[in-house]
Image (cartoon, rainbow, N blue to C red):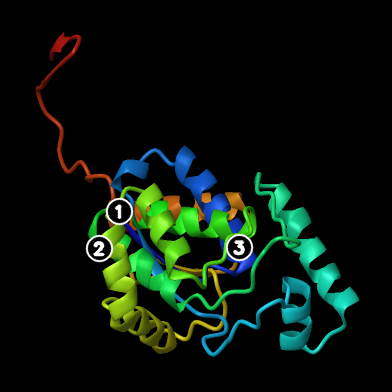
Amino acid sequence: MKVEIWSDIVCPFCYIGKRRFEQALQKFPHADKVEVVWRSFELNPNYQPVPGRNTYESLANNKGVSLAQAREMTNHVTTVAKEVGLRYDFDRAVPTNTFLGHQLIHLAAKHGQQDAAKERLMAAYYTEGQNLNEIDTLVNLAAEVGLDAEEARTALTTGAYAEAVRYDEYQAQQINVRGVPFFVFEDKYAVSGAQPTELFAEVLEKVWDEFRPAPVLLTDGPACGPEGCD
């Protein structure tokens, strides 16, 4: 079963949705048969980081709200994140343009480390306050998940995976993705948002049963089993 997930590195509900989906997948009896593919989506592709501007100021400017309202918004998602074991630290978070980060995740996919890279970048942003605008930071994170540092640096400086990111975003437009996270199961069923773990579990079962149905027994006859023969 193939599950494609469009998300952004700096989308708070994308990280929460990742955890809830993972919790459902851990209990799914066919988890080893599920292929998860992370697709790029930039919430603010034109964002230009302003040195010294913190998350609250950036959010207030982007949403047209007060600093107090921006803090309330982050406090809400921080509370929700705790429910799935994530400790967001918006006081340390560095507002980021995620285009380079998405390119790194595509490089990681080439080496079978896509999920590890996605997790590492999200943790670096939400819990560690690392600056994902800097190539040096991204290269160090790439090395932490087992990627070759020089290959990562070359890929990021040359934009080797820029087109791959843009193609993911083009696909998102074609299937009318309006918000993330956005989950697509077997190119047929979609789930939008950081839904409860129970719902993801139900969808996994439904899609598996539809695309991997049990054989229908047409006739029965003499046979042998663990306890002997008929």
Q: How far is the residue under mark 3 from the one under mark 2?
A: 33 Å
From the viewer's perspective, tell me whether residue 188 is left or right of residue 212: right
Residue bearing mark 1: 147
On screen, residue 123 above or below 223: below
| Image quadrant in which the N terminus is located | bottom left
Q: Earlier in the sequence, mark 3 or mark 1?
A: 1
**C-beta proximity under 8 Å, tags 2 and 1:** yes
Give yes or no for contact between labels 3 and 2 (Cβ–Cβ under 8 Å). Answer: no
Between marks 3 and 2 in the image, the one whose residue lies nearer the viewer: 2
For the residue carrying disc 3, how many other residues have a C-alpha within 10 Å: few (<14), some (14-19), or many (20+)? many
Between 162 and 194, the one lying in front of the other is 162
State the residue at coordinates (67%, 64%): 93
Q: Identify the disc placed on residue 122.
A: none
- State left or right for residue 12 relative to residue 22: right
- Which residue is tagged 2? 151
Q: Nearer the viewer, mark 3 or mark 1?
A: 1
In the image, what residue type sits under mark 3? Ala
From the image, tell me which residue sits under label 3.
194
Taking the image as shown, residue 149 lies to the left or right of residue 230, namely right
Question: What residue is at 72 percent from the left and 80 percent from the top?
Answer: 58
Marks counted in the figure total 3
**Residue 196 point in image, percent of width and height:** 63, 55
Amino acid on which the number 1 mark rests in the picture: Leu
Horizontal and vertical percent position of residue 79: 78, 54
